[in-house]
Image: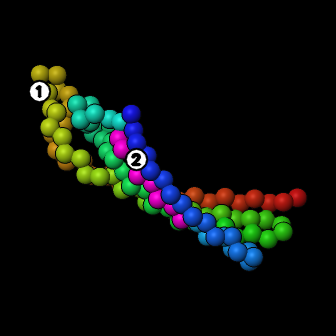
């Protein structure tokens, strides 16, 4: 089972620009015994920012997210089956998104 904490905020003023930001923390469901280079999951912090630009004809939404996986040290290598891996797994993910909506 995983735990998750999420928060976010948005600002939609009377202008044509909206601002958004968010944060989440997720715990990993992957036990140490099964962590390997094919599935190097770990607890993660996600930070996101975005903006929306709109008028009566169209809207454009842009977003960026950085996912930082907490360093995970495992010692689960089994030399008899050649499964598992010993070491520290370090990961980050960088995500970009864009969406355009036309009103006709």
Q: Earlier in the sequence, mark 1 or mark 2?
A: 2
Q: In the displayed image of the protein, which residue is found farthest to the right? A: 104
Residue 42 quadrant: top left
The magenta stretch spans residue 83: no
Residue 84, position as x, y percentages in the image: 20, 32
Q: Does residue 72 appear anywhere in the picture?
A: yes
Quarter of the image with the N terminus is top left
Q: In this view, does 94 lie to the left or right of 86?
A: right
Q: Which of 7 and 15 is in front in this view?
A: 7
Answer left or right for 53 relative to 72: right
| 27 magenta-colored | yes
Residue 73 coordinates in the image, percent (x, y): 19, 45
Percent of width and height locating residue 50: 57, 65
Range of magenta residues: 21-28
Identify the residue shown where x is 88% and y is 58%.
104
The answer to which quarter of the image holds residue 37 is top left
- Check the image and report above or below for 20 versus 40: below
User: Which element type, helix, strand or loop, lies under badge 1?
Assistant: loop
Q: Name the residue under label 2.
A: 26
Residue located at (35% from left, 41% from top):
28
Relative to 9, is 79 on the left or the right? left
* Callout 1 touching callout 2 (CB < 8 Å): no
Residue at 75% in and 76% down: 14
Residue with the mark numbered 1: 79
């Amino acid at each position: 089972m995983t735990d998750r904490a999420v928060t976010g905020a948005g600002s939609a003023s009377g202008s044509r620009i909206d601002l958004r930001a968010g944060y989440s923390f997720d715990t990993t469901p992957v036990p140490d015994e099964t962590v390997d280079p094919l599935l190097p999951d770990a607890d993660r912090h996600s930070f996101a920012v975005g903006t929306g630009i709109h008028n009566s004809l169209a809207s454009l939404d842009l977003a960026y997210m950085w996912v930082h996986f907490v360093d995970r040290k495992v010692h689960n290598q089994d030399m008899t089956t050649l499964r598992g891996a010993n070491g520290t797994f370090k990961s980050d993910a960088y995500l970009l998104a864009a969406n355009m909506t036309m009103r006709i």
